[in-house]
Image (cartoon, rainbow, N blue to C red):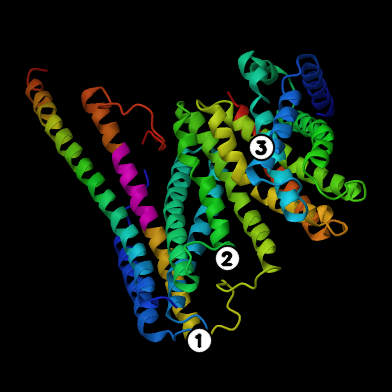
Amino acid sequence: MIDGDGYVAAAYLVFLALILIYVGIMAVRLGRLERDLAELNELAEPREAAPREREPVA
Amino acid sequence: MRHAVGALLRKDLRAELRTLESIPAMTLFAVTTFVLFHFGLDRNSLDGDLAGGVLWVTLLFAAVLGQNRLFVAEQEQGGFDGFLLAPVDRTALFVAKAIALFAFLVVVEVVAIPAFAILLLGPDLLDPLPGLIAVLLLADAGIAIVGTLVAGIAIRTRARDLIGPLLTLPLLVPVVLAASEATAPLLAEAGASGPPGRWLAILAIYDLTIGLVAYGVFDFLLED
Amino acid sequence: MSLYGKGLKPLSIATVVVLVGALALAAFYAPEDADQGIIQKTFYIHVPMAIVALCGFVAGGIFGILHLRTRDRSYDLKSYVAIHLSLILAVGVLITGSIWARGSWGSWWVWDEPMLVSFLIVFLLYATYQPLRFSIEDPERQARYASVFAIVAGSFVPLNFAAVRMAQSYVHPRTLGTTTGGMPGEMMLTFLVALAGMALLFVTLWKYEMAAKHARFQIKALRRRLTGDGGPTAGRSAAPQVTA
């Protein structure tokens, strides 16, 4: 057995690394989603304001 | 359905006879590969495991070569549209093309096996010939089914010549595995024995399973 | 509009608990193997990953069948995510398997281990899934062809395993088997817990990714409603696009 402990640790670490990389990528994607949402919220505001202005006229 | 298959098959075989697109190329490729193996392995004669392996890898690559051309005519000359308009079961196209590819492989092998026997094979081929033919037929069926299915998928994609081999080769690993294991005792130096029934059974099961799956799924490739 | 985020929190907590439990069991409870020594403990990561990945590939095929039968594109998305996650797990299987081989026999690869060899083949096959999707532009056809692939590949996986196993078992006895013949109770328990943890992890990540993709589609649709265009078009993509 060639330094068994090290290899076992390495195997478990590989598993951990894969999970963390995956979570990291998802976190980046979430950040992008939140940015898009913020942008859309901004776009939605004037639209909500405009119809309310027009209503009294009609 | 049988009429449709017959008609399509006849068309393809006649087209191949007239144009001689695939078969000569596949055969030449196989023989050339044998020569390459001679130089690559630096051996004058092979037997047993090595012979089986070289033979099957070569046949596999020749098949992949032929598979690429299988649907080209349909794609480029509107054959798909014409076929879809006809009131026939769409799977007939799959069956016809698979039989055609099988037929091409058999013809290629009629030349390639003797070439192999002359160029590279150490032991005599006459005794184990019936066993070898059984293995060839079973393996060819698997190769033809998978080759046709993958060709059907690949022809409509952008990188069709690349996707074809990439999909086919992993799918055919069990065939190469079983065929090599079955062929090795046939080509053994110290007296050939029959092909182990176990591997023939595996080839048969593979052919059946993948054939059923391909049969069920091919329709969906042709929808537009 | 299905909500994939529902139930994600308890699922994640369960996953963490079970996985940490498995780790603890592997580290402190499971005995060291008499023949192989400590390196055998990689077994608790390597084999569960393999089993879950295989199930994931088959699930991808089943979703493919459902997609083709119902024409519901959400099944294509489910298939894509399942295959995608299983491919990542497959890479993990290959790496941990290689580490195990190195620890046991000193070389980074062994052809004697049917699990490892089969996974190499399966990996090579499924690695073509994304390029295949990417090479078909029409989204409807992309989904259809991807489902065909998922079905063919999914049915191929068990065939492949059987064939490779047969080739090995007559030459070398299996040393790292998934069968539990002769495995002491403590090892069995640890193994089962690890398997459960891995399965939970897969389902959690699957839901996680489905939720993220759905959120993205909703945002795109929302943007289209608000501004009239879908935002910067990404051009071709390999991932399924479901119009919410």
Q: Amino acid at mark 2?
A: Glu
Q: Are marks 2 and 1 on the same chain?
A: yes
Q: Which mark is residue B19?
A: none
> Would you identify the image quadrant in which residue C77 lies?
top left
Residue visible at 80% across and 27% down? B5
Residue B93 visible in image: no
Image x and y of residue B36, in percent: 66, 37
- Name the residue nearer the viewer: C124 or A20: C124
The residue wearing badge 3 is B36
**Label 2: how many residues lie within 10 Å, few (<14), some (14-19) or many (20+)?**
many
The kind of secondary structure element at disc 2 is: loop
> What is the magenta range?
C205-217
The secondary structure that dominates the magenta segment is helix
Residue shown at 49% from the left, 38% from the top? C72
Against B51, is C110 above or below?
A: below
Label 3 to label 1: alpha-carbon separation: 48 Å
Nearest to the observer: residue B84 or residue B131: B131
Q: In the rendered structure, does residue C221 fall within the stretch colored magenta? A: no
Residue C188 left/right relative to B143: left
- Which of the 4 quarters of the picture holds residue C226? top left
Chain for disc number 2? C
Instruction: State the CA–CA distance, disc 3 to disc 2.
Output: 31 Å
- Which part of the image, by quadrant, shows the N terminus of chain B? top right
- The residue that label 1 is drawn on is C34
Crowding near the residue tagged with mark 3, few <14, some 14–19, many ≥20 C-alpha atoms within 10 Å: few
- The mark lying in front, picked from 3 and 1, is 3
Q: How many numbered callouts?
A: 3
